Image (cartoon, rainbow, N blue to C red):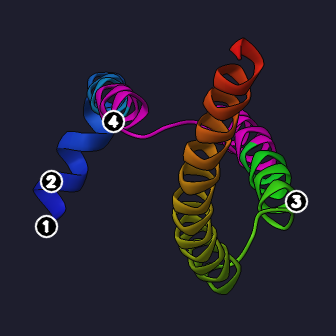
Amino acid sequence: MQPIIDYITGNWAIFLTACGTIGSVIYLVLDTRYARKATITEGLDDLHNKFNAVEDRVDKVEQELQHLPSARDVAALQGAIRDMKGETSALHTSIKGLSRLVDLLVKKEINTGDK
């Protein structure tokens, strides 16, 4: 152990230079591999701003969805439309019969008007 200490004290300048070089290499490797605090803070701020923007958009969509009908309302509307379709078919049949009667009355009036 004593010869190692004697060697270090005798060549301390070379030893410090080697330690400084190794320390610098380690620092550069760690610096390129891991992000700095300022970069992380900027990234978190940017992420926070984007999150707030998305949250605002979701709020707007939720407000618009409140005005839309529910599934029950849509089912009730579909039933009402089906009923109206049936009623219009019945009305169409009735109107067709009335139209035929009107045509016959018009022909009768035309024929009696000629005499």
Q: Is residue 83 above or below residue 24?
A: below
Residue 44 lies in the magenta stretch = yes
Where, by quadrant of the figure, is residue 81 drawn?
bottom right
Sequence-earlier tag: 3 or 2? 2
Sequence-earlier tag: 1 or 4? 1
Compute the Cα span from label 3 to label 1: 78 Å
Residue 21 lies in the magenta stretch = no
Q: Are marks 2 and 1 in contact (CB under 8 Å)?
A: yes
Q: Quadrant of the N terminus?
A: bottom left
Identify residue for label 3: 63
Where, by quadrant of the figure, is residue 66 drawn?
bottom right
Identify residue for label 4: 33
Identify residue for label 1: 1
Q: Secondary structure at mark 3?
A: helix
Sequence-earlier tag: 3 or 1? 1
Q: Is residue 37 visible?
A: no
- Taking the image as shown, residue 79 lies to the left or right of residue 115, namely left
Identify residue for label 2: 4
Q: Nearer the viewer, residue 45 or 19?
A: 45
Q: How many marks?
A: 4
At label 2, which amino acid type do we have? Ile
Compute the Cα span from label 2 to label 1: 5 Å
Q: Secondary structure at mark 1?
A: loop
Where, by quadrant of the figure, is residue 17 drawn?
top left
